[in-house]
Amino acid sequence: MKNLIINSGVCDARGMQEEAYKDYESIIINTEILLVGERSRAILARLPIIQNCGLTVELDDVEDVEAMVVNGDFEITASMQVQENSLLVVNGRLKVEAGAEEALKAYKKIIVAGSLQIPKSLSGFLNRIQIDGATEMYPDGYTVLEDTLTIDRLFTLRAEQGGRYYVSGETVICDDAVNLKKLIEKQVRIVTPKLILPESMVEDSTAVFDLQTEYVTVPEGMKLIYGDAELDTFLLQKYGGSLFVYGDLTVDRTADMAVLAEKIDRLEVLGTVTVTETQKEDFLKTGAEFGKLKVIKSGRLLADKLRVKIDQTLFDRCPEGIVVCEVLKVIIDSAVNPEDILERLTICDCGSVVCGPEQESAVAAVSENVGRIGSGEELHLLDKIKSSKVANVENYVM
């Protein structure tokens, strides 16, 4: 075999012998973690090696290390048994439970390609942890809840007497009928960075929430919609004409905005409002407050699909144009004229668009939040693979 391809979670190169690899024309190492020592690093530099490594960790050549890679979230608990001198890599969020001192001591090193959540009492272990993202330290003695907490009638009933709760994200009170006084009677305390609640509940909330909490208040008489929403007749019938949207709002592209506007008394949108060109004028007449206005072309909507193909026949059947949103792969037929793309096509929030070289500039001009635009031609390594030794393993020792 002329080539060697290693696909592994962990590749340990510390004990490699140069003589065993010098006859390969090329060596490709695809690994999450590459373990090297001073001697093996020099050998790797002399060999025809292509390294695609998530992380390279240098250790002693003879040091016995147990390495583990976690793709996703991971939690270190107080009861966890960890082998001494272990290496942990987390491609996600790492949560550390209070009382996990012994488990942390067993790790030689922890690398987090994400965020870390750890109790304040264990902050002394931070020098053992390499973190790419944010670090949040929660108060000891507090129960860690989900990232977002919605306080409703059930939560007020289930909260423990003297309960202490930590929320890393946002806490939401959607209904002004929630009885906060019940939480006050139970002497419940909640630590959260942000609280969204009706204006009428602000005074009572101060007995429950931390002084450092950021407040977002919903004006009296307005209905809170937490999250993204679509503005249509159904939404107005369900929640009324005074809406406070904590998120983005998209106007139903088939709706008559003039009719909807008559039913809107007050509208506030903290995020982006998306309307078509024909809806823009009537929407602005509502006097709505919003963070940003996004105007898209009118036309046929193709959305939430894995694959969409745009050809001249489709253009002919959609005289008002085509809007493509949230599609993994968009393929544009080579016969489609670049002028039609510029005048009658809108592409947003898509993974990739495959088109011809003469179409690329037009596609780029009508695209927003698209991962890749190009011909779709990819480098094929079939000949190389046929003459290669391929190792697909979780752990590979060179």
Image: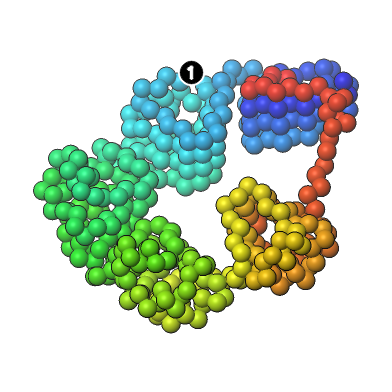
Q: Is residue 147 above or below residue 290?
A: above
The residue at the point 61 percent across, 64 percent down is 300
In the image, what residue type sits under mark 1? Answer: Gln
Residue 379: which quarter of the image? top right
Please name whichever residue, 178 or 1, is drawn nearer the observer in this view of the structure: 178
Q: Residues within 10 Å of mark 1 (few under 14, many from 20)?
A: some
The residue at the point 86 percent across, 26 percent down is 386
The residue at the point 58 percent across, 56 percent down is 303
Please name whichever residue, 324 or 30, is drawn nearer the observer in this view of the structure: 324
Please name whichever residue, 286 or 357, is drawn nearer the observer in this view of the structure: 286
Residue 176: which quarter of the image? bottom left
**Position of 388 compared to 257: left or right?**
right
Q: Position of residue 120 (x, y in %)?
A: 34, 40
Q: Is residue 393 above or below residue 367?
A: above
Answer yes or no: is residue 368 visible: no
Q: Which residue is mark 1?
A: 83
Residue 246: which quarter of the image? bottom left
Q: Is residue 127 above or below residue 339?
A: above
The residue at the point 63 percent across, 35 percent down is 55
**Position of 60 compared to 74: left or right?**
right
Q: Position of residue 245 (x, y in %)?
A: 38, 64
